[in-house]
Amino acid sequence: MLKKLSVFIFGERRQAHLPDRVRESIAKQQVESEKLISWVQLLLVLIFGTLFAFAPSSAPEAGFQPVPWALSTYFIFTLARLVGAHRGQLPDWVLMVSVVMDIGLLMALIWSFHIQYMQPPSFYLKAPTMIYVFIFIALRALRFEPRFILLSGAAAVIGWLCLVLYVLFSVPENPMITRDYVTYLTSNAILIGAEVDKILSIAMVTLVLAVAIMRAQRTLNRAVQDSMAAADLARFVSPEIADRITSANVAIQPGDGESKIATIMFTDIEGFSTISEKLTPQELAGMLNEYFSAMSDVIYEHGGTISQFIGDMLVITFNASTPNQDHAINAVRTAVAIQAVTNSRTFGHGKIGGATLKTRCGINTGDIVVGAVGTTERLVFTVHGDNVNIAARLEPLNKEYGTYILVGENTENACRGMCNFELVGEVTVRGRTMPTKVFTVKD
């Protein structure tokens, strides 16, 4: 029962241990919040000073005037806090002292009004400056930590209570207490109920803000974790697919997908098995990372999306997850650019030195399905369909024809007039009964 009530009031509790990187991300946000708080405080003290400078005063010109001193002290303290916030030199104990100092200096400023204007102490209890207490409490909400809000509210309650007690006991023979509301409003008399209302208001605002920030803090923690999870997801799948998954209005289910006219390309490194057996696992991984990085640059330059990494093979889509109006010719241009890159440089620095990684490409255009396949527990976001299978079959056919780029008939039709192709044969691709014309790109 208590657990349900806690969840109802404060929201779902965060996991017991947040990853260090999540904590660091939240800490950075809090540092930025402290900078914002410091600037707002500086703005407030400037407002105080401006109002004091331009507001008409009934105080005598000569004699001690405490308000300028209180404002000057608060201004210096605020500047020091601002510098500390920008230098990241505000540990928790300094922040707690700062909270108490903020409220303390505000209360001292309010207390000084009766001296400044030569009135009885009860005079300052009616100062509208008291409203700024709520601003100082609300400021702590920018940090998303309830403890600072509670500390600020507690300091304000104690501070105002001290001001009330000072009024009651400063002149014991004449406490100036009244029960008449009109008398209270039109004289320096004090109404105990009014002061109790102020203290209760401060306490209630503090509690409501603390509960709201605790709920927001838990939501923030989950949001930071989800944001990092989405960023991590984008490293394992293409950013376009990650965005599609994370921005879906409803959870993606197995079989969800859409039909699109797109171009698919499969690539594979020639003789990779022979190369890999001569390298250590570390050397092989380094070479592949270097190779994939170079391929990614070429692919993204032409608007392609890497859908899958399968060993040394790449599955690349054009116009599947992101719009690409000229997807067919862009796929061909990508294949030609890949040949240019792999023929002009080597990859890796293992026992065999830098290796030349000639890459075979199979390209086909047509109607495909883009979506999720798998089970409810484990999904793979991929492309599938007959035209995808044709592209997958064309890539290994390069070995038979001594080529490095083979395209299907649909791709050749889509690129006609923009690229020179040469018909290399008409084959029945495994898994199909109808023969498929196969083309290569002429130099």
Image (tube, grey):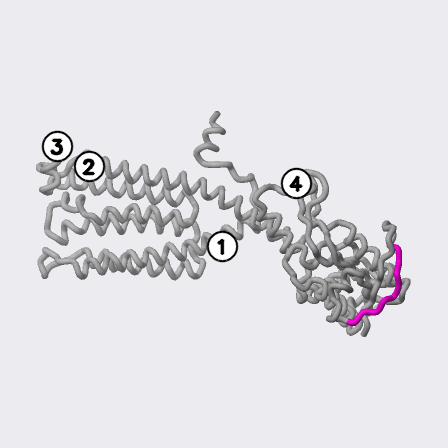
| Label pair 4/1, CB-CB below 8 angstroms | no
Which mark, by number, is residue 179?
A: 3
Sequence-wise, the earlier of marks 2 and 4 is 2
Amino acid type of disc 3?
Answer: Arg
> Disc 2, disc 3: CB below 8 Å?
no
Q: Earlier in the sequence, mark 2 or mark 3?
A: 3
Question: Does residue 192 appear to the left or right of 3 in the view shown?
Answer: left
**Of the residues under marks 1 and 3, which one precedes in the sequence?**
1
Q: Nearer the viewer, mark 4 or mark 1?
A: 4
Magenta portion: prevailing SS class: strand
Disc 1 element = helix
Residue 371 percent location from the top left of the image: 68, 47
Q: Residues within 10 Å of mark 4 (few under 14, many from 20)?
A: some
Mark 1 and mark 2 lie on one chain; the one further toward the N terminus is: 1
Crowd around label 3: few <14 · some 14–19 · many ≥20 (10 Å): few
Could you say which disc has been placed on residue 28 in the image? Answer: 1
Residue occupying image coordinates x 86% and y 53%: 434
Task: Residue at 69% x, 42% y: name it.
Answer: 255
Residue annotated with mark 4:
253
The answer to whether 359 is drawn above or below residue 222 in the figure is: below
Where's residue 206, x and y in %?
Answer: 34, 40
Based on the picture, tell me whether residue 66 belongs to the magenta stretch. no
Numbered badge on residue 194: 2
Q: Which is more foreground, mark 2 or mark 4? A: 4
Q: Earlier in the sequence, mark 3 or mark 4?
A: 3
Q: Give, as a single range, the part of the protein colored magenta.
A: 420-428
- Residue type at numbered disc 4: Gln
Q: Is residue 424 magenta?
A: yes
Left or right of residue 157, residue 397 in this image? right
Q: CA distance from mark 2 to mark 3?
A: 10 Å
